[in-house]
């Protein structure tokens, strides 16, 4: 579920850290040695059903699989003459890995802009700056569910995410319930639907390499437990639920997939038993499904070519050859205030849970080979202590996967962060460096080639630089302590790093958005060259990198910014000039105010892009075009009726 408004970014870092806080089984399967996880395929449907029943029965509680839910919150082509001129230079979605596209609210090919909001896909011609095509894709949710896009040539895949809790979009909050739908659209003329996939379960994330999209969904068993009766204890209720689980059919676990092809023919399918795998340890309470769809070929008889895992997952990271799905611990336990000077000298142990406290924090990471056509093939799995912040906590380089995690102690009173290096082929840990930010947690991570940058925070912001050239002996090479923190780090070339986050007092109280320019050319001596501070403000770019725009050709950066200083609330996009040594403010872009029911409000800008010599910004209400050099307003394109 999502909210219709985004929280002010003062809480952004916490929202990002809590992205995995969905309901979870009350028990956890016994732990195996870290790094010793592997997936095993079922031999037939009988073995599959028996295994799922056994594991799910062992993990069901008196309230079913989720338990009492506890959430912690701190977000037309005809009008275009393609022969008239060359496609203008343009920015693209800010993604983690070059060549691996990620779903977003807005896409462009330079000649056209594609955007989806309120359940309507619209096409804008960048030359005329007019909406030239639209397609209503509203479902039962009335268009309120989150929706993203992936575009390849004249094909778009619209990801309508339903009301399921998707880890990558948890910062948006909550939305009315609805079914996840993936709709394939032909953009060659007036947009039209040419296929669709309706999976059971919640959308997790997707990645596209070339024109091939890998979609990840997550679901729980469809089992109806008996209603609670008066004077029935939890032990008896749990026993009743276990009996129900042991009698549940296989269809309770295997998600049904509805596939519509270009002819409009509809068929339903489930994942064949032999294409379902499981780790050596699993709970039977969650099922991941990976779908493959080539936008160039469309929805064919092969459908979404799915495979499934009897496992959980909430973070997706992809390269050109690999797709990683990570399962964070399904619990979040708040870190209690702790005197850092009195904190234990050793890192928290994941093997000594406090009675009545949370289970050990361990993150499983599954790697799939996506180098060939068709469905991914399972490659290997690994396990590391602690939990991830987001997909930027993962990075593959030269045959190794680097994983940054924060591990809290069993009593929740201390924490420490580490970077683990795994051999990608077998997902075995080959090296690690720990002791980062004792008493703190990770707020941002960025890996750039053989170098890593980690920001931790509680009262001050240590920016750590790491040397990862030798996978067996990663090491910290430098540390910079400043107030506040960077929640997103972006490479700016020539030994420069841009940080977007919050300034804070020496006591750790956040004060407002800060943009920092770091000199990291000398790994042993990272320095902050420049800082721009906006009191009592927050930016969506803190928790959603897609909201951050950096255009190296002119040194222009754009971030959404909301300010509540002096009792007034303003929202827009701040335009910055970033040189080799300084960050300065160029100006602010705001969208036209609207009045509804006598109340005026300013639409919040969510995305920005450069097309030619103009900055395009997007809010729920519309798109605005401003001159890149002068910021003079050139056009307003409404996107609501």
Image (tube, rainbow, N blue to C red):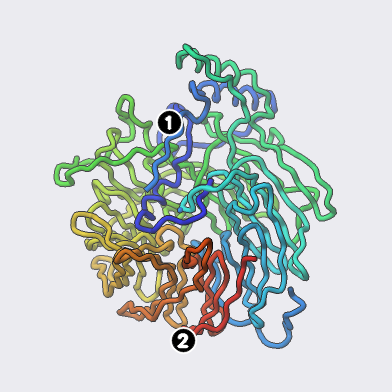
Say which of 436 and 458 sits in front.
458
Q: Confirm or deny contact between disc 2 and disc 1 (CB under 8 A).
A: no
Depicted 316 relative to depicted 448: above or below:
above
Residue 533's image quarter? bottom left
Query: Horizontal placement of 179 versus 580: left or right?
Result: right
Say which of 563 and 532 sits in front.
563
**Residue drawn at the location 45% of the way across and 87% of the way down:** 630
Residue 423, horizontal then vertical, whole percent: 46, 49
Q: Report how far apart the C-alphas of labels 2 and 1 lie in the structure.
A: 58 Å
**Residue drawn at the location 62% of the way across and 68% of the way down:** 639
* Residue with the mark numbered 1: 32
Residue 133, horizontal then vertical, whole percent: 72, 70
Residue 8, horizontal then vertical, whole percent: 39, 58
Going from N to C along the chain, the mark reached first, 2 or 1, is 1
Query: Horizontal placement of 351 versus 309: left or right?
Result: left
Q: What residue occupies the far front of the structure in this picture?
A: 598
Secondary structure, mark 2, is loop
* Residue with the mark numbered 2: 629
Residue 271's image quarter? top right
Pointer 1 local density, CA inside 10 Å: few below 14, some 14–19, many at least 20: few
Query: Which one is closest to the eye, mark 2 or mark 1?
Result: 2
Depicted 360 relative to depicted 88: above or below:
above
Residue 585, horizontal then vertical, whole percent: 35, 78
The label shown at residue 565 is: none
Question: Does residue 520 appear in the picture of this structure?
Answer: no
Query: Horizontal placement of 333 versus 196: left or right?
Result: left
């Amino acid at each position: 579920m999502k909210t219709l408004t985004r929280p002010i970014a003062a809480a952004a870092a916490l929202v990002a850290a809590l992205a995995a806080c969905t309901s979870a089984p009350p028990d956890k399967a016994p732990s195996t040695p870290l790094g010793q996880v592997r997936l095993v395929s079922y031999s037939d449907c009988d073995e599959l059903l028996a295994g799922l029943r056994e594991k799910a029965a062992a993990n069901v509680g008196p309230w079913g699989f989720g338990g009492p839910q506890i959430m912690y919150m701190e977000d037309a082509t005809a009008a275009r003459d393609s022969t008239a001129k060359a496609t203008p230079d343009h920015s693209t979605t800010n993604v983690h890995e070059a060549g691996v596209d990620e779903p977003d609210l807005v896409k462009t090919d330079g000649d056209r802009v594609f955007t989806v909001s309120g359940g309507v896909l619209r096409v804008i011609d960048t030359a005329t700056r007019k909406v030239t095509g639209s397609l209503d894709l509203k479902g039962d949710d009335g268009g309120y569910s989150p929706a993203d896009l992936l575009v390849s040539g004249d094909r778009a895949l619209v990801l309508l995410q339903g009301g399921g809790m998707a880890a990558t979009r948890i910062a948006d909050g909550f939305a009315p319930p609805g079914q996840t739908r993936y709709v394939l659209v032909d953009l060659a003329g007036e947009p039209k639907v040419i296929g669709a996939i309706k999976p059971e379960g919640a959308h997790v994330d997707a990645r596209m390499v070339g024109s091939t999209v890998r979609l990840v969904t997550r679901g729980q068993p469809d089992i109806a437990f008996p209603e609670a009766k008066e004077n029935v204890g939890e032990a008896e209720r749990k026993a009743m639920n276990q009996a129900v689980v042991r009698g549940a059919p296989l269809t309770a676990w295997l998600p049904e997939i509805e596939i519509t092809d270009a002819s409009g023919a509809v068929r339903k399918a489930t994942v064949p038993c032999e294409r379902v795998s499981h780790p050596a340890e699993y709970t039977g309470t969650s099922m991941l499904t990976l779908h493959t769809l080539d936008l160039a070929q469309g929805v064919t008889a092969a459908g979404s070519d799915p495979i499934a895992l009897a496992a959980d997952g909430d973070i997706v990271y992809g390269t050109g050859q690999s797709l990683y799905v990570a399962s964070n611990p399904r619990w979040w336990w708040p870190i209690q205030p702790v005197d850092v000077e009195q904190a234990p000298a050793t890192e928290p142990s994941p093997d000594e849970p406090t009675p009545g406290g949370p289970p050990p924090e361990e993150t499983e990471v599954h790697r799939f080979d996506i180098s060939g056509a068709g469905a991914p093939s399972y490659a290997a799995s690994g396990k590391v202590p602690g939990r991830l912040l987001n997909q930027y906590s993962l990075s593959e380089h030269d045959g190794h996967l680097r994983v940054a995690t924060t591990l809290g102690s069993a009593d929740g009173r201390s924490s420490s962060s580490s970077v683990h290096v795994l051999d990608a082929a077998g997902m075995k840990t080959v090296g690690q460096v720990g002791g980062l930010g004792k008493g703190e947690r990770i707020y941002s991570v960025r890996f750039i080639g053989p170098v890593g940058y980690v920001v931790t925070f509680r009262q001050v912001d240590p920016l750590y630089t790491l040397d990862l050239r030798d996978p067996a002996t990663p090491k910290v090479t430098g540390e910079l302590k400043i107030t506040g923190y960077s929640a997103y780090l972006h490479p700016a070339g020539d030994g420069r790093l841009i940080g977007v986050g919050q300034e804070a007092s020496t006591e750790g109280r956040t004060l407002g958005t800060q943009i920092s320019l770091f000199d990291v050319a000398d790994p042993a001596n990272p320095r902050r060259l420049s800082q721009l501070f906006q009191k009592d403000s927050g930016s969506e770019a803190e928790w959603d990198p897609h909201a951050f725009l950096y255009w190296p050709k002119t040194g222009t950066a754009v971030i959404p910014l909301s300010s509540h200083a002096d009792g007034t609330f303003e929202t827009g996009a701040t335009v910055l000039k970033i040189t080799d040594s300084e960050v300065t403010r160029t100006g602010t872009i705001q969208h036209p105010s609207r009045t509804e029911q006598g109340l005026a409000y300013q639409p919040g800008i969510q995305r920005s892009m450069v097309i030619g010599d103009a900055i395009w910004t997007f809010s729920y209400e519309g798109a605005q075009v401003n001159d890149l050099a002068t910021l003079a307003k050139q056009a307003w394109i409404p996107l609501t009726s």
